[in-house]
Amino acid sequence: MSGSTRDSAEQESGPTQPVANATQAADALVLFGITGDLAKKMLLPALYELVRKQSLDVPVVGVTRSGWTIERLREHAHDAVAAHGEVDEDAFSRFADLLRVARVDYDEPASFRSIAEQTRGSRFLAHYLAIPPNLYAKAAECLAEAGLADQARLIVEKPFGRDLESARTLQVELSEHFPEERLRRVDHYLGKDAIEDLLTIRFANTLLSELMHRHHVRGVQITMAEDFDVADRGGFYDGAGAVRDVVQNHMLQMLAYLVMEAPRTGAAADILDERARALRAVRTVQPDEYVRGQYEGYTDVHGVRPGSTTETYAALRTFVDTDRWAGVPFTLRTGKALPASATEIVVELHRAPFGYFHTACAQETGPNLIRLRISPDAGVIFDLLAQHEGDAETVDHVSAKTDFTYLTGSGTAAYELVLTDAVSGDPRRFTRMDMVEESWRIVGDLLDPEDAPTIYRKGSWGPPEAVDLTADGWR
Ligand code: BG6
């Protein structure tokens, strides 16, 4: 077993105590970045869906720097919703009635009073920042100057910092105006039913809860594969790369759900504490347990620096230092332009001794696998072994498959939950600062390496050497 033990991040952070206002429901949602890409693709369609289902009825104040009129905003929202499918015009008109618009200028803090005008009469606000992270601190400061911070929650999109140090700096800047209990950090994977369901699958089924232990598990692989490339996101992606874009957040949160212990109760604080405890037990990944790749042609993408060494593929191995998981390797991989889009967790069980069979075939057929599928279709597949027809010495591979098709993994569905919680104040589907610190600690030694990534062909499974991180290849 290789890899170092945990470092000091865990000693310096701990669960945050809830205080007054922590979960107060907001009676207006203030959406910064309403004219941006995330709002167009995810937030506006999700808000419309919530209004259509009669789950949201608070005003939505769109904050712009470009002085959009309310008519223009409504038209833009309609286009964004229509891009997702058929529009229920009655529902849309209810949504349009909730929309307001406020114009701000970050160089003129007084301009933030326009938000106060649009939220007059509201008792508690939810400020959602879907803007470039370098504006977060300024926005928080301007909101405070305009008297819009004390009775409000601040919700920020990922990434939260670029590494441990910058995350801590950002935390200091934001918490000056919004203390931790009124701060929410978005990771939309936490809004995916299929990820949250890992808790139910693991702990409501004694069939599985007993098995998910080093006594039975030989190794775990987590794959988040995407068959599309960075497309028009070159400018953003090149400054991030796969580790910052999805490993530090989405994949580690998935890992936390997979390895955490059962929370004492279903209360948000108990769930958050267990997730944080799980991350504290994950070892800092060593550079020699990390393989990075870049797909061929990436440097031709608009916005990517010439000769960029940013990774579009990352594979790594770590261990979870708890009694339950000691010694079990966890191998994670993610990449753009791979052959398929799929997110799944494969739990490999120890092989049976096969004393009775004595056949090469039984050994070759492999171990039992439990595939926990997150997307595109949620469900579980058990890979089992059964006797071959008419031949007791030969073993066949059969799978038992269950689909949880009602559990959606889509981005907009996840954002419906994120936005609902942003308004209601429930913190369970956000990342707490102690988790952010642990996540940056875990990947800290992998950020910005000097060496060039391995170039891989688009549509391939990435650098072949990544297989060396696994015991018997990728499942
Ligand atoms: C985002 C990343 O956070 O998550 C993207 O920036 C990635 O690069 C996306 O494609 C994946 O989300 P989903 O919901 O489509 O799996």
Image (cartoon, helix red, strand yellow):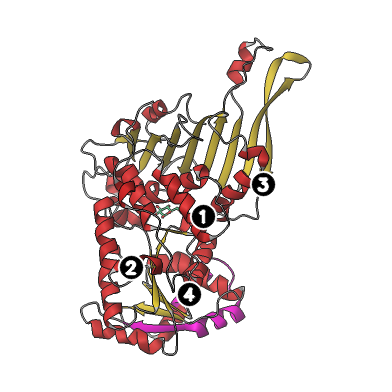
Kind of residue sitting beneath label 4: Gln
Per the image, label 3 sits on a secondary structure element best described as strand
Q: Which residue is mark 2?
A: 131
How far separated are the C-alphas under marks 1 and 4? 19 Å
What residue does disc 4 label? 24
Q: Disc 1 designates what residue?
A: 271
Return the residue nearer the eye: 315 or 85: 315
Percent across and percent down for residue 324 are 51, 35
**Residue 239 locus on image (x, y percent):** 27, 52
Residue 299 coordinates in the image, percent (x, y): 27, 46
Helix, strand or loop for the magenta stretch, by majority: helix
- In primary-sequence order, the first of circles 1 and 2 is 2
Query: How many discs appear?
Result: 4
**In this rendering, would 403 be left or right of 428?**
right
State the CA–CA distance, disc 1 to disc 3.
Answer: 26 Å
Per the image, the residue denoted by label 3 is 403
Earlier in the chain: of badge 1 and badge 3, it is 1
